[in-house]
Image: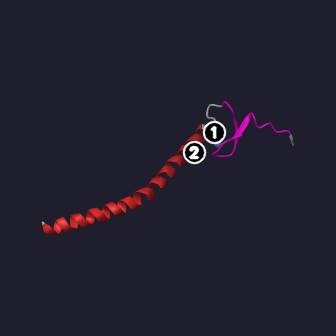
Amino acid sequence: MAVRKKSAKVLRCPTCGGLVLIGSEDFPFCSDRCRKIDLGKWAMGVYKISSPVVDPELLEDLGGAGTSRGKDSDDY
Ligand SMILES: [Zn+2]
């Protein structure tokens, strides 16, 4: 109904899309729960990012270490 919408006083919660009052305790989230959900998403994102980065290194490390160790093991 209200055509004139001043979005200066409210923002959308990045987690649930609900309205958030600027200056609220949990800003920019609408509630502590949404803040924690967002934090959880970040933690998962970091975990996902670190996995593919580790994989190639791990494979290289395993290949190099496995080869040299294999030779050493054979010699001994
Ligand atoms: Zn929310």
Cβ(mark 1) to ligand 1 < 8 Å? yes
Nearer to us in this view, 44 or 31: 44
Residue bearing the label numbered 2? 38
SS at circle 1: loop
Q: Is residue 7 magenta?
A: yes
Looking at the image, tell me whether mark 2 or mark 1 is earlier in sequence order: 1
When asked about the image quadrant of residue 26, the answer is: top right
Ligand 1 in which quarter: top right
Q: Give the colour scheme shown.
A: secondary structure
Image mark for residue 67: none
Q: Amino acid at mark 1?
A: Phe
**Stretch in magenta:** 4-23
Residue bearing the label numbered 1? 29
When asked about the image quadrant of residue 58, the answer is: bottom left
Residue appearing at x 69%, y 32% in the figure = 22
The quadrant of the image that shows the C terminus is bottom left
> What's the distance in space between the residues labelled 2 and 1, CA to CA?
9 Å
Count up the numbered dots. Answer: 2
Give the main secondary structure of the magenta stretch: loop
Up the image or down, 54 lies above or below 17; here it is below
Residue appearing at x 49%, y 50% in the figure = 46
